[in-house]
Structures are given as structure tokens and as C-alpha cells.
Image (cartoon, helix red, strand yellow):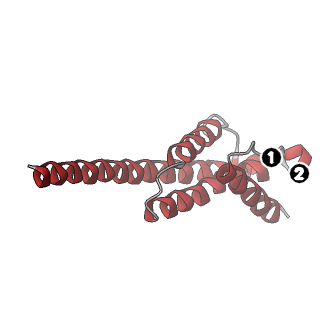
Amino acid sequence: MQDAQKELVEAYCTLALVKRHTLPDPTALGIAPAAFLNGLGEAVGEARRYVLDLLRRGDSDGCDHLLGAMDEIYSLLVTLDYPDALTGGLRRTTDNTRGILEKTRGDLTLALRQEALVAALRAVERSVGEG
């Protein structure tokens, strides 16, 4: 049952992140705390996929917002230091979340720097073409 709850939370949280809505309340969903926290961590992976899809389409708008939300989720999860028997493996989920966050930060930084470089090269091309 906990895996099903975790998947449900992952779906709700991913949708909320993408739509820039407030994250769902675990009590309103009727979800156990451990399943909610693990599902929240799993949503970070889905947010990464969404960021990468945006970057592939050349649409970096919204990526910073998602990265910030991913960072906030990690910041919350890392503060919860309870035995795995109580949290359903939250420590592993938190460790995975950190890796996903750092990879996404690197990919986004690289993509934004590349966009800036392309814009600078186009500006040079225009100035040379006019001269």
C-alpha cells in the first residue's frame, strides 16, 4: 500500500511543481507521512525530466523555478533524520534527490551558458554583417 501511496504523491507533486501550484497536503490526500515524503522525493526526478524536456525544446523559462522547488524539497528532506524503519527508506530517497538536484543544476547552468554564448555570437555576426 505504501508504494501505491508514494506513486500517487509523486504524480500529484509533479503536477503541482510543473503547474506552479502549492504542493498537496498529505492529510487531505489521506497519505501516510513516510509515503508522502518518499513520493515528494521521487517527484524531484520527474521535475528533472521536465526541466530537460524544456531545455531540449529551447525553452529555459520555468527551469529556474523548478530547480528552486527541487532545492526546497531536498532542503526539507535532508532535515528528517529518522530510522529507515519509520521513514520507509527516506534516507536513500534523499540521497538520490541530492544527486538528481546537482545533475540538474549542472545541466541547467550549462544550457543557460550555451544560450548566452549563442546570443553573443549572433550579436557579433550582426555587427560584422553591418560593418
Q: What residue type is disc 1 on?
A: Pro
- Where is 57 relative to 118, above or below? below
Q: CA distance from mark 1 to mark 2?
A: 7 Å
Residue with the mark numbered 1: 24
Query: Position of 62 compared to 90: left or right?
Result: left
Q: Residue at x 80, y 46 (%)?
A: 24
Residue nearest the observer in this picture, 87 or 100: 100
Residue 70 image point, x, y percent:
58, 45
Pinpoint residue 44: horizontal percent, then vertical percent. Answer: 60, 53
Asked whether the beta carbons under mark 1 and mark 2 sit within 8 Å of each other, the answer is yes
The structure residue drawn at horizontal position 54% and vertical position 62%, both measured from the top left corner, is 49
Residue 29 is marked as 2
Packing grade of label 1 (10 A; few <14, some 14-19, many >=20) is some
Tell me if residue 5 can be seen: yes
> Where does residue 59 sit, x and y in percent of width and height?
47, 57
| Residue at disc 1, secondary structure | loop
Of the 4 image quadrants, the one containing the N terminus is bottom right
Q: Amino acid at mark 2?
A: Leu
- The tag earlier along the polypeptide, 1 or 2, is 1
